[in-house]
Image (cartoon, rainbow, N blue to C red):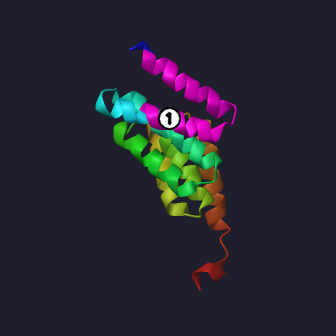
Amino acid sequence: GSMVSTQSTGADKLLKQHKLIEAVAEYTSTITRLKSSGSDQVLSSAYNSRGQCHYLQVDFYKAIDDYSDSLKYNPGNSTAFYNRAQVKYRLNFFSEARKDVLKSLEISPDFEDAKSCLKAIDYAVSNKTPSEEA
């Protein structure tokens, strides 16, 4: 019904205002409500947005979990693949990140941010110091 859309836009507004703790709470209640009766599409989007909050709170592992849940409900969510790639990139999981970015570009070939992310990953990989492998 109409309730759902106003609920998630409230959370989206909080995210834009960087009121992250409140936004996480909103998204969490949206997710809880949608799990019993809701569209997978909306659920995927709520998980993706909550992941974004966790990412901005530098809670990278929680962010990865939410992006993964987002993809469970909508495997075609190229933004969630891209977002998860960015977190993995920040954690230096380059090959994992690369897989996600390629998946994102497979779904949305014109996704400019994903193209830049792929360049950044390849650059990081080619400049990895050999001492790490020692």
Place of residue 113 in the rendered image (x, y in percent of width and height, measured from the top left): 62, 40
- Magenta-span inclusion, residue 13: yes
Residue at point 42% right, 48% down?
Answer: 68
Instruction: Give the overall secondary structure of the magenta segment.
Output: helix
- Give the camera-side residue of 36 and 53: 36
Place of residue 11 in the rendered image (x, y in percent of width and height, measured from the top left): 56, 29
Eyeballing the image, is 55 above or below 113? below
Place of residue 18 in the rendered image (x, y in percent of width and height, measured from the top left): 69, 37
Residue at point 63% right, 40% down?
Answer: 20
Res. 120 in view = yes
Res. 109 in view = no
Which residues are the magenta region?
A: 3-30
Eyeballing the image, is 104 above or below 122? above
Identify the amino acid type marked 1.
Answer: Tyr
In the image, farthest residue toward the top: 2
Residue 52 occupies quadrant = top right
Q: Which residue is mark 1?
A: 27
Residue at point 67% right, 36% down?
Answer: 19
Place of residue 34 in the rendered image (x, y in percent of width and height, measured from the top left): 36, 30
Eyeballing the image, is 126 above or below 65? below
Left or right: where does residue 84 sit relative to residue 19?
Answer: left
In the image, farthest residue toward the bottom: 134
- Magenta-span inclusion, residue 106: no
In the image, farthest residue toward the left: 36
Eyeballing the image, is 106 above or below 40? below
Left or right: where does residue 53 sit relative to residue 64?
Answer: right
Q: Secondary structure at mark 1?
A: helix
- Give the camera-side residue of 85 and 63: 63
